[in-house]
Image (cartoon, rainbow, N blue to C red):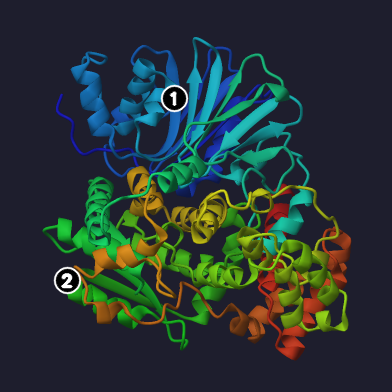
Amino acid sequence: MAFTDKEDGMCGIAGFCNLKGDWRANIAKMNERMHHRGPDAEGVFASGDERVVLGHKRLSIVDLSVNGAQPMESHSGRYVMAYNGEIYNYKKIARKLLEEGKVKAFRGASDTEVLLEAIEAYGVENAIAMSKGMFAIALYDKKEQELFLLRDRVGEKPLYYGFIGKDVFAFASEIGSIAVLDGFRNDIQTDILDIYFTHGYIPAPYSIYKDIYKLEPGTMLNIKFPYEKKDISITPFWSMREAAKRGQGNLFQGSREEAAEELERLLKESIREQMVADVPVGAFLSAGIDSSTIVALMQSLNSGKVKSFTIGMSEKGYNEAAAAKEIAKHLGTEHTELYITEEDAVAVIPKLGHMFGEPFADSSQIPTYLVSKMTREHVTVSLSGDGGDELFCGYTSYESVSRIWGKMKNIPYFIRKPCSSLVLHSPLAKNPIYRTKGTLLGAKGPGRLYEISYETDPLVKKISKTHGSCPYKYNQFEEGYLAETNHNIMLMDMLMYHPDDILVKVDRAAMAVSLETRVPMLDKDVVEFAWSLPIEYKREGKTGKRVLRDVLYRYVPREMMERPKKGFSIPIDKWLLKPELRKWAECLIDRKTLVRQGLLDADAVWKMWDDFTQRGIWRIQIWFVLMFQEWLNETSAMFH
């Protein structure tokens, strides 16, 4: 049959093994908990002995027929799969299967069926190696009685897994779907709280619950029956670290102009694949380099007007809507904007605990949700510019670390270390500036310098009453893994901050309103090419993303883009001082409540709050605490 442009769309997956109770009621609960991820259809599979159960919620982007329904069985009946995501090059794989006679014909026109038949024909690892896309996959091999879980290379799609009690293995796109299962009594993973209160998110492989984990990007888990906890094996099928090392060891030899040519070609290829859908597709547009590049290339590939969306704020210093509107007008898009108010933000806050399923406190979650909500009124799929900062050296912090390390590196560590201790144990340490300088002086390398920027406030260490023992990858990242300082720090972010903060924020906020987001810069070929570029093609002085700008300036005048970047943030500190939000916050951190819960140090929390409300000292950890408490409220309501 002819292969048309049909894919399955965003979904939620769930399942369990060895549950003793009513499996139908339990999988129904799991599916219902992630209804927003797939409001259009749902499906269930149970193995003959009812030991393995898979569930699926579907947001139909195209192909509403039963031929695209999931969980789906392979033609031979050996494999069954529940899958969330998109395989962008599935038509190419389908042609290969047909040409090689592995498949005589396809029943439908979905990427799910193609992926299943590729697994049947080439094996799990080979099929995934040839697939480009974003995905979370649960695959059951009936013949070998083996379950596989796979997560895409960069971590666009979420996948949680773990044990409930001794025997029940469960997994889902959202942690809340695991928490509704009968018998779920997993305690809070208090060891992770120090990391959460430092960074505002819980990094993979950890989750907020003991024995429940996030599958890390680019890895495959498999578990064979009969199993014990120790029988789980996790292996990488692609590695960001190795891609970076390989790229930096084999640098692009062309000029910067040639690099821009190749980057433009790769981005256009990625965008062309990601614009495929039978429902309306649009894009988020801020006034920044990344989203403007994506929208410019989308428009260049499109005969009609691309739909672009932005949100603005009346708060001075936070509003990019006027600049975005100017860019949209120049590119000729059909542009929609929404100005958000403090009232809009206040209305979102009570939803955040449920939306994210575990504590998460990047405050740009609020505008991300609001722009997604507006966008969903017009389209079902939206492309975003995420990834540009981390892949093309955009953050100003990269330049700062590089500059500071340039000054420090010639002083031997055996001299700097005691000097650092001297400053930190002197009266000077009471001053935050000297405390920071003293701490920076003791850094062994630029990676540690970057880490320290999160850690210099001793009060933050006091928030959690249980001081954790979970090792965080930031602390384990070896200095000089990549020879060039900026690239080393960018890799740290691509391994940690980007998948565990940025991609979590976009996925949960968009899926809360059943909007599918796609990220063209995270295409495998774009990522691998970016790692092969020398640093001077990315940054010169304080100007980052040079080669990306070179691409953009072919479509948008340079002077339109050369303005200070405001970021996608909100004035949360100002808003928290207003009566309604202040009352909400003080209710959450009520001293008696904190003491009864026994997790946070009430004195440390109130010292931070008083510093803020009485003395104007803002710490972002205030928001981290409030989001933690909001999540606790949500979960206690769920369990009682």
Place of residue 80 in the rendered image (x, y in percent of width and height, measured from the top left): 44, 21
Residue placed most toward the observer, 208 or 385: 385
Q: Is residue 373 left or right of residue 420?
A: left
The answer to whether any part of residue 105 appears in the image is no
Question: What is the secondary structure assignment of the residue under circle 2?
Answer: loop
The answer to whether the residues at label 1 and label 2 have Cβ atoms under 8 Å apart is: no
| Residue depicted at x 33% and y 15% | 75
What amino acid is labelled 1 in the image? Glu
Q: Which mark is residue 593?
A: none
Residue that badge 1 annotates: 125
Residue that badge 2 annotates: 332
What amino acid is labelled 2 in the image? Gly
Residue placed most toward the observer, 549 or 14: 549
Place of residue 426 in the rendered image (x, y in percent of width and height, measured from the top left): 87, 79
| Residue depicted at x 23% and y 61% | 257
The quarter of the displayed image where residue 169 is located: top right
Q: Is residue 229 left or right of residue 266?
A: right
| Residue depicted at x 25% and y 20% | 97
Place of residue 595 in the rendered image (x, y in percent of width and height, measured from the top left): 88, 64
Q: Residues within 10 Å of mark 2 (few under 14, many from 20)?
A: some
Question: What is the secondary structure assignment of the residue under circle 1?
Answer: helix
**Position above or below: 11 against 572:** above
Q: Is residue 419 left or right of residue 35?
A: right
